[in-house]
Structure formats: structure tokens, C-alpha cells
Image (cartoon, rainbow, N blue to C red):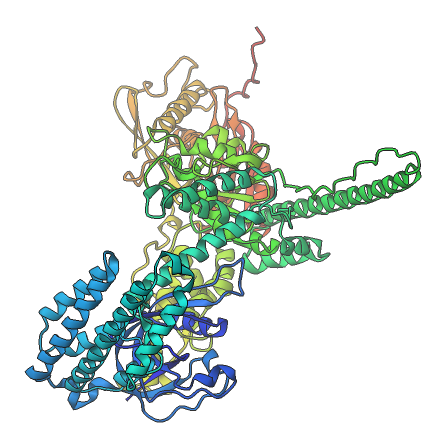
Amino acid sequence: MSTLAVLPLQHPLILLPASRITIPVKKELGQQLASLIQESEAQPVLAAVPIVNADSAQGEAPVLNEWGCVARITRLVRPSALNPSETYLVTLHGITRVRLARPLKLTSNAPEFMPYHPVEYGSTSQKEGQVPTREAIDAFKRSSLRLLEKLGHDSGKGSRRDAWAKFSSMVEDISDQRAGWLADVMVGSIISEYADRLEFLSECDPEERLKRATALFIKQTSITEVAKKIAHAVDESVSKQQKEFFLRQQMAAIQRELNALNNSRSNLGAGVGSDSDSGSASELDDDEAANADDMADIRRKIEAMEPGSEERKMSVREWRRLKRIPQGSVENGVIRSYLEWLTSLPWPSETSPATTSAESLETLRDRSFLTRAREQLDNDHYGLEKIKRRLIEYLAVVRLRQLAAEAENAKMKAQEEKALVLAKDAAKQDASTKAPSLPKPVARPPKANPVKGPILLFVGPPGTGKTSLGQSIARALNRPFQRISLGGVRDEAEIRGHRRTYVASGPGAIVQALRKAGRSDPVLLLDEIDKLGQNNFHGDPGAALLEVLDPEQNHSFVDHYLNVPVDLSQALFICTANSLDTISQPLLDRCEIITLSGYTYDEKIHIARRFLLPKQLRANGLDASQVDLTDDALLCVATNYTREAGVRSLERAIGSVVRYKAVDWAEHADGANGKTPERYNPKVVADDLEAILGLARWDGDEREREERRGVVYGLVVMGAGEGGVMPVESIAVPGSGHLKLTGSLGEVIKESGELALSWVKTHAYALGVTESTREDPLRVPEAIDIHLHLPAGAQKKDGPSAGIAMTCAFVSLLTGATVPPHIAMTGEITLRGKVTPVGGIKEKVLGAHRAQITKVILPYANRKDVEQDVAKEIRKEMEFCFVRTVEEALEAAFGKGKLGWRLKALPLLESRL
């Protein structure tokens, strides 16, 4: 015995095994069927039980038949969004017979819901497994072939005759095991009498089912012969002069045959030539009805478009072409697909010409809009204060421009109403002189007020929250959010769409996002814009975005497939990228760059405590009382097991810890391994992480530094956007005065090394390395080579930021002075001894803070970057030395008076020739 959802079938609907039926259902029942489909991994099944009393539609309580059919839901058509009052259409496929275990009482509104009820399958009966006798099969075969022969002869040429011929071949090849199944198929497709099919539904024994089907086919054969006789009699009695009496003659012939056959039912002719309520014929009728509904829906959408607009003209032109082309042609499908796309976009309509939705307008009118936007950003993201401030400015501009547009539209409307009143007064005064009446002012629709930029471009390492910031903006504005992934897009047509001349053509990603959003003012996130394909024979997808992201042009964006201008001025575009190197300059010029450089460890711990840990607890079926991850453990995970600018690896590591504790809790709850409630400890400390996550990937080796001659520590930015400290090592070896650079260095950093050595050679006498200004420190008193190495040679290194570090390393090697290990530096130098600014200051300072560096030497031009980007708590813990020249950098690194300059450095002179 099983429990299934029971779907009552209205009288006179009946579903037999191996048959298919499509029925309309009300909204409440359709929503239940949709929920049942979503909850099931495969196609769900239910019990379709017919209602046997025909008066249930007049308010009487429905009475269910004892027997029904287990049906699989193969299709559910929902009503369109423009007409939600339409009914659902559900298609059911019969599987096997089923009987209600006990009577099911329904109320008058029972067809509006599906009750769950215990049922018994007909296949559990012993008779179901029996094989019919050969006599029953032969009788069924003879009666069915005779009936199919008459039906096929009377059908003429067409699909129905082909269906009867297909049934005939199946009967000819009938087997003992499939005889019962074939009887179900043929009865469901041929027999139209409700009482006959209802009685046939309750028969589980295959042999009795064949006998009953044989009797029904014999009866249907006699009905077909009578119908043919009636039609022949009518044809003989009707001539060209008596066509007006055709219906009367047919009725008289029917009445004579009814009087002759007293044992026949009174409505024998009702099923003559009619399609079956189930089976393939019903499917054809359903498809035709659905096609008609779709065409009517397209026409309604065309009529709702704004009169005189370009999209309406194109829709009317294509609609007329569609009506002239046969339905079965290929061109018909192409035009129909085009009209479906064209009418599904959120065009301005005659009733609502304004493109901004009412929900968005109501949100912007709210006086607490900015307050709620700040709360939304704070709830979704921790830190990022500078970025949040810029986004609030952005949202404030959106709101002010919209309010200004509403005030302008209200003023314009008042002026038009005033002009209309003056026109009416003037018409009354001039009526006696028969002056021509003034034209009536036409009420213009309110103008859209697009926010013309800027286009925001979030640039930062992976996992720093670029996509989620776009979602927060959409929630704050109460607008739909659509993400368009541009990673790997190498065809211009994927942005602008394929032309209709191509096979399987369609619109581009922008138009598809507008259709999914359903509104003309969504928030569109162009994700991974830096990973667009380069210019090739498919076109340049980056160039296709130039019009999309230009506020002065995107009000008339033309998709190649639609070939109609689409207004994108109401949409808010937000772009994301990991790097600016691969973005073309014209495209970059249209965007305002907002950099997300990464999170500090303090911010990561807050994010993990506030967002990541609760998310992983929910995902693994635990709560906060079952897992207690201490702050020391979180800090250990962030520093020793993950090293990134974002928090994705941190979330994965926290998920591993939570899953480990989930196993412990499951064993504790089940009493496995002898665990007792006292032995389960929800707390996770730093010492437990090695047993859970294994050995740490980074054990803090960068903190193990020593003070040695020729070794200084520079600041670098790694590939993932994370900063760090790297030693710059140099040694002197016998040679001929050359410089050797190793460590997988790029061309720029090699040039920085040669530049640093040239400066040291120039100032060797002032530093006390040589006894004369003309001596080479690498050749006097003996010839040596300098070997400079940057560790981790497997990682490629390049960039203009190692000039100060290399200079200090050379000075330390040649003079013997050492730089304390708690000092790190970054900056580039020139031949004149100036220190130029570098990038990645925030990442480098964070890396130095992690490595317990207490003093950082930076270019003076990067002072503003430290004040704006570095957190206050870090600035309080570290000492920053901002230098303008190499001399100031050496004094800050070695200490005042440690080098012992022989003579004061000469002032820098610039030629004015």
C-alpha cells in the first residue's frame, strides 16, 4: 500500500493506462502540481481518479470512482505573465491501474486541491500476472482488425488512417504478455462512451480485459456500420435542389435507424467521427489549441505596444508575413520565433510609456532610501568603507535625478493642462465669429531620465565581493539583477546577436538579460570583462560593448537579430575585472574604476564570524551551539592555511572544519564508538587545526629573518593580489666586475638592478667604498662580480618597485653595514637619485604587517595611498618613512650616521638647454 496525491478528473474525463490526456486546471491546483514537480528529482506521479457524478459542477459534492490510474506528469504549461488569470495545462501519461484503499470523501471545492490518500496498485493482484488464453487473444485480434479496417477505410487519406494502420500492425504482431497493454491503448484511443471506458478501467484481469475489449469493439463496429448506412441514405436522398433540407433528412434517417435498433443507446451517433478524449488524437487537438493561444498572446502583445514606435511597426510587418506563410514551412517557425523574442522584451506600452517601473519609483521616493541603502551594504559586506561611500554617492545621484525628472514632468503636465483650459476659453469666445478651433494640446508621456554614468568597474582579486556588491545595489534600488558572464566570449555576435539569415540565430546576451529581467531598468552585471576574447575573424566582442557602455549612445542599441533600437539608458551597468591589463583603452575610458585590493586579517575574521561560518553551519545541518570556532583558530586558518586577497579559500577551509565537527556530532548523536554527551566538545581551537586540515601550507617562514651583510627585505605583490615580504640577497664573488641577476626576473626588474648598481658606482667615493671618484668598486682593490638573487625562482617576478631594495643591498654588501630585519622597503629610483612612486601600496603594507615588519620605507608620492587605503589600526602599529631621494632612503634604512658619508651629496641639477 502506498500514498499518492489524488487528482480528481472532472466528468466525463477518464485516463486509461498507456493513454495520454491534457486537461486545464485551476490556479491553486496548478501551483500544487508545480510544487510537486520541483520537489521530485524525476517526473512525479499521482493517482488520476475520475469523478463519476455529472452534477458535481452544479455544487454537489464530487463522488470519486473506486478505480483510477497512476499517471506521470509529463508537461505543465503555466499561464503567461501578462494574463495571470489563464489556467494551467497539465499533460498526464497513464501507467497502471490503482484502487483507493478506502473511500475518499471530497467537498464541493475538492477539484481545487490534491489530497494525499492510500492506494493499492492493480499490479499487486495475482490476476495481473496471469497470461490471457489463446482463445481470448484470437477473439480480440479478429474483432479489433475488423474495426480498424472499417475505421481506416472511412478515414480516407491522412494522419488518422495512418494511425489505424499502425494499430493494425501492432495487432498482427500481438504477444501474450502485451495483449493487456494493447487492449488499454486501443480502448483509450477508439472507444468514446464514458460508461464503457469507466467499466473497462476497473478490470485488472488481463483475460477479462481482452473479453471486455472484444465486446466493445464489436459494438463499435456495429455503430460504425450504422453511421455509414445513415450517411449513405442521406447522400441518396439529397440532390442539388434539396440542399436546404439536408439536416432534416439526416435527422429523419437517424430516427428511423434508432427505431429499428431498440437495444442501442439513444446517443449512438454522438461519437461518429469524433476524436477520442485521450490518446494521440487528443494530443493533436491540444497542440492546435496551444498554437492558437500562443498566436493570440503574440497579437495582444503587439497591440499593447506604443503606437508609432519602431518595434510596433516591425512587429506588424512580420505578423502580416506570418499570416501569409503556411504553418508547416520553415520560414513560419523563423518569423514566429522572431516575434516571440520581439514581443517578450519590456517595451514602452500605450498605457505605460514611462520605462521606469512603479516599484523602483516608489523605492526612490522613500525619504529613508539612502539610510536603507547603507544598511543593505553594511549587512552584505564588512569593511570596504571607501567603496561603500562611492556607491552611496552613486545611489544618491540616481535618486536625485529621478526626483528632478518627476518634478519636471509634473510642471510640464500643469502647463499642458493650463494651455488646454485657455484653448477651451478661446474656442468659446470665438464661436460666434466661427473662428477655427485651436488644436488640442497632446499630452506627452513623461520623459525617461536615465542616469548617464558613470559605468562602475570593480577591479580586484577573486573572492573580494565584486559580484555581491552589484547584487546589493540591485536590492537597494529594488530592481531585478542579471549577471552576464563575459569570460571566454570571443564572438561579437554573442553581445550583439546573430543576424536572422543564420541558422539557429538569436539575440545577444544583453537582450536576453533584458528578457529575463522583465523590466527596462534592471541592474546588469558584466562579469569578468577583462577575460573577453581578443579581436579575431569573429569580430571584436570588446568593441561591441562600446555602444552598450556609452551613456550617450545606449539609448538606441541595435541588436543584429532584432534589428530594432533597444533603449538601455534605464539599465544600470556594473562591470567586474581581475586586472586592467587586458581591457582595451576605449572600453576602459567609459568606466569609473573602483579598486578592491583585499581584506586585512582583522576584516577576514569579522567576515568569517559574521557571514562564512553561519553559511557553512546552515549548509552542513548544524547550528552555532554545536560548533564554536575561536578567534585564534580563525586567525590561524586565515594566516597558515589560506593566503589570498579574498575569502573563498577561507570559506572552503571553514567548511572543512565544520564538516569534521559534523561527523563528530553525528557519531555522538548516534552513540557510535562509545561516545557520550560529555565527550563531545563543540569548541575548535588553533591546536586542533592540524588534525583537521593537515599541515599548514604557510608556517610563517617569512617572519624568520636575520640581519646579514648584503641582505635587505623588499615588499612585493603576489599573483593573487596578496602582499608579502621577499629578501633581496647579494654576494661578492671573484670575477671581472659584472652583475649577475637570478630568480626568474623580468626585463623591467633586471633594468632596475643595473640602474641601482650604476648609482652605487657613481656614489662609491661618497659612501667610502673607493679612495677616488674614478675607481670602480667592482675592480678595485680586486676584481669581483656581484650576484643578486631573489628567492622562489619558480615564480616569475617583474615590476618597477625594487630599485630602493637593490640599492640598499649593494650598499650593504660593499660597505659592510646591515639593515635591521624589521625594516622593509619598496620604490623605484632614477639615475639622478630620485625615488618614484609605485603601486600596490595597500597590499604591500598588509603583507608587511602580517610578517611583523615595524618600519616601512615608501616613496613620498605614495603617502596619500597610505592615508586613504590603509586601515587606522595598522598605521598606528607601524612606522612609515616617506622618502624623496636615494640618500633619504639609505639614511632611513641603515640609520642616521651609520654609513659615514665622506662629503655631502651634491644638489641635483637639471639642464635647461
Query: Which image quadrant for residue 494?
Result: top left
387 left or right of 209 in image: right
Q: Could you say where residue 489 lies in the image, as x and y percent from the top left?
A: 37, 39
Residue drawn at x 49%, y 74% as measured from the top left: 28
Q: Could you say where residue 715 lies in the image, as x and y percent from the top left?
A: 44, 40
Above or below, 304 against 308 in this view is below
908 left or right of 413 in image: left
Q: Could you say where residue 285 lies in the image, as x and y percent from the top left?
A: 36, 62
Q: Residue extending furthest top?
A: 913
Nearest the camera: 106 or 667?
Answer: 106
Above or below, 232 against 378 in this view is below
272 left or right of 755 in image: left
Residue drawn at x 44%, y 36% as measured from the top left: 496
Residue drawn at x 45%, y 69% as measured from the top left: 630
Q: Residue extending furthest bottom?
A: 102
Q: Split into 4 quadrants, where in the image is the C terminus?
A: top right
Q: Residue extending furthest left?
A: 134
